[in-house]
Amino acid sequence: MRLGIVRQLAERGESPCGVFETDRPKSSLSHHFRVLRESGLVSTRKSGTVLLNTLRREEIERRFPGLIGAVLGEMPKRGPKQR
């Protein structure tokens, strides 16, 4: 469930909780977002009555280079060929 949330945030960017389709109760989704926030992977801000969630990709990449890419199954970015 949490990996799915992280993948969707990586694809969509900032998103409200309501866009995440799940067959689980709302309380379960809230729990997973809380765990992701407490672990530092996701930040949440309030805009009016809506909570918007964002993957903290830049901060995580600075601290743990390549981690988010590995979790999401992305190919590593390669620099110019070295001889």
Image (spheres, helix red, strand yellow):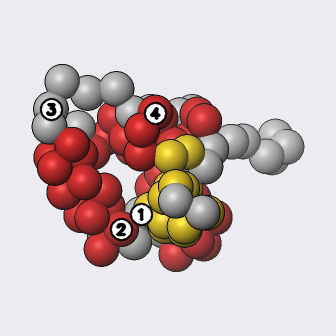
Q: Earlier in the sequence, mark 4 or mark 3?
A: 4
Question: Is the residue under label 1 in contact with that under label 2 (CB below 8 Å)?
Answer: yes
Q: What residue does disc 3 label?
A: 24
Residue 41, visible in the rendered structure: yes
In the shown orientation, is residue 67 left or right of residue 28? right
SS state under label 1 = loop
Q: What residue does disc 1 label?
A: 41
Q: Earlier in the sequence, mark 3 or mark 1?
A: 3
Residue drawn at 79 percent across, 46 percent down: 79
Residue drawn at 30 percent across, 74 percent down: 38
- Which kind of residue does numbered mark 2 sit on? Arg
* Alpha-carbon span between mark 3 and mark 1: 21 Å
Residue drawn at 50 percent across, 46 percent down: 16
Q: What residue does disc 2 label?
A: 37
How packed mark 1 is, by other alpha carbons closer than 10 Å (few <14, some 14-19, many 20 or more), is some
Q: Nearer the viewer, mark 2 or mark 1?
A: 2
Quarter of the image that includes the N terminus: top left
* Alpha-carbon span between mark 2 and mark 1: 6 Å
- Which kind of residue does numbered mark 4 sit on? Val
Q: What residue does disc 4 label?
A: 19
